[in-house]
Image (spheres, rainbow, N blue to C red):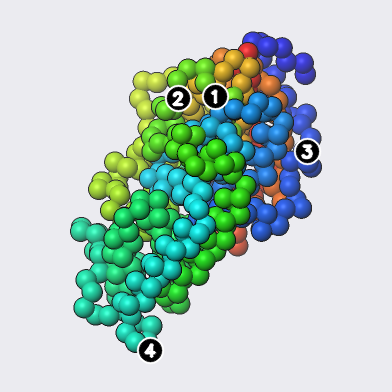
Amino acid sequence: MEMTEGQIISPMETLHSFDAKETNRIWSFAECKPSDTAKWTHGYHRYPAKFIPQLVEKLIDEYISNENAHINDPFYGSGTTIVTAISRGFKASGTDINKIAYLITKVKSTPINPIYLDKKVKQFLSNLETLKHPNTSLFEENIEPLVPKGQLERINYWFSEENKSELGKILRVIYNEEDELIRDFFLVAFSHILKNCSIWLQGSTKPTRDLKKKTSRPYEALRRHIRRMQNGNKIFYGVVPPKIRDNTNDYLNINTADAKCQPVPDDNVDLIISSSPYVTSYEYADLHQLSTIWFGLAKDLNEYKRQFIGTSYKKYENMELRSKIAVDIVNKMFKKSKKMAKEIEAFFIDMEGVFDESFRILKPGGRCCYVIGNTKLKGVEILNAEVFAESLQYSGFTLDRIIKREIPSKILPQKRDERTGRFASNDKANSEAYPVEYIVIGLKG
Ligand SMILES: C[S@@+](CC[C@H](N)C(=O)[O-])C[C@H]1O[C@@H](n2cnc3c(N)ncnc32)[C@H](O)[C@@H]1O
């Protein structure tokens, strides 16, 4: 189908443009090895549903030709888009409502002089060594662990006494570091090891306890992970253009905020590359609760959860969806579950607001690329990609391109439980998650 600038195509035509789509193998990146997808700083911290950097790189290669480009991601997560933009010498901006995402992305996008970092790491590890009993791996009893006030119950739920005490002592040493960038670097390492050091069921993204789990010892896990991060930083430092290396803050503009409030003036951005949350899939606030409790970041967890798009904590009254395809999905779901119908409605209403904001910040001629998969909940097809394609047009975009890509099984994130819609470990789930997904691209004419 020919799509001309400014033309809004009907919901039927929008749906039809997806029917005819073939998968494009070039966009599968099937040949990528884990060492490619975790290159540079991309391996600093696990993150559910994160991009592979190669996808972001290819979109930038296709759409950006100016040296001073500005790239934005309203849902930066672990910062794949932001890191890639910085690696190219571009301005990078964006938001994520998850406070842990902010910490991870800030640290991953800020190259540190490797010689300075090495000095700091040696100092830090030697400070920790002095906390240990000679000839044993146990930490001295007389150092007061730093366990955040009011969080003791949650921490006891997830950690053994031994690990809790060792982690608390490590955290105290981290907070003694005066250089904020180095302190944050250690905090990311600390955050990453928490899952292995807790009884959180290893293969699960849901907060489930495994009382028989053999947990890692914090100091050793941290030491190993910091070494890995140092190697990643060294290579990243070599890749980032010197003009950015020395003034990263002038190029990096990221916030902990809602995706509908970008920290950017009108008509400023060249390209948006993003993947939104999925409706009722991950509860990101739950997912990162180990870090959130250790860092004392969420005073009121329920209020925090309500700010996340796509969660079961969001509902809107008296707001109307513009997308006809979305209305149809919500009506079908209403017959199966009123609660889930309201959640899906809230998700699409939120996304319409995000697309309006994308339109505001893009330069004329700029594009937004949203990566999204479809799914099935309670027997109802949730055509996220089709809704996105229609909604982008109501926000003012021309539907420029739809790319259908296969997700090679080795990097397929997870499967879903068809009943609840939640991501589940691959052996338990009863429906395929996203064997294919779409990149829906809107053009601001
Ligand atoms: C699919 S993930 C993005 C992953 C990212 N592309 C990466 O490579 O790591 C979606 C993100 O949306 C964030 N999110 C959820 N609700 C949000 C909101 N209201 N505003 C901004 N970000 C939000 C989640 O915290 C999560 O990090």
Kindly report which numbered mark, 3 or 2, lies closer to the viewer in this rendering.
Answer: 2
Q: For numbered disc 4, what is the local secondary structure?
A: loop
* In this view, 95 is above or below 135: above
Q: Are marks 3 and 1 in contact (CB under 8 Å)?
A: no
Closest to the observer: 161 or 84?
84
Identify the mark nearer the N-term, 2 or 4: 4
- The picture places residue 57, in percent across and down from the top left corner, at 67, 40
Q: Is 223 on the left-hand or right-hand side of 427?
A: left
Q: CA distance from mark 1 to mark 4?
A: 57 Å
* In this view, 426 is above or below 90: below
Residue at the spot of label 2: 264
**Residue 219 occupies quadrant:** bottom left
Q: CA distance from mark 4 to mark 3?
A: 58 Å
Query: Could you classify mark 4 by the number of other residues whose Cα lies within 10 Å: few (under 14), some (14-19), or many (20 or more)?
Result: few
Identify the mark nearer the N-term, 1 or 4: 4
Identity of the amino acid at label 3?
Asn
Identity of the amino acid at label 1?
Val
Which residue appears at 52% of the width and 57% of the height? 114
Residue at the spot of label 1: 269
User: Tag count in the figure?
Assistant: 4
Closest to the observer: 144 or 134?
134
Residue at the spot of label 3: 24
Query: Could you classify mark 3 by the number of other residues whose Cα lies within 10 Å: few (under 14), some (14-19), or many (20 or more)?
Result: few
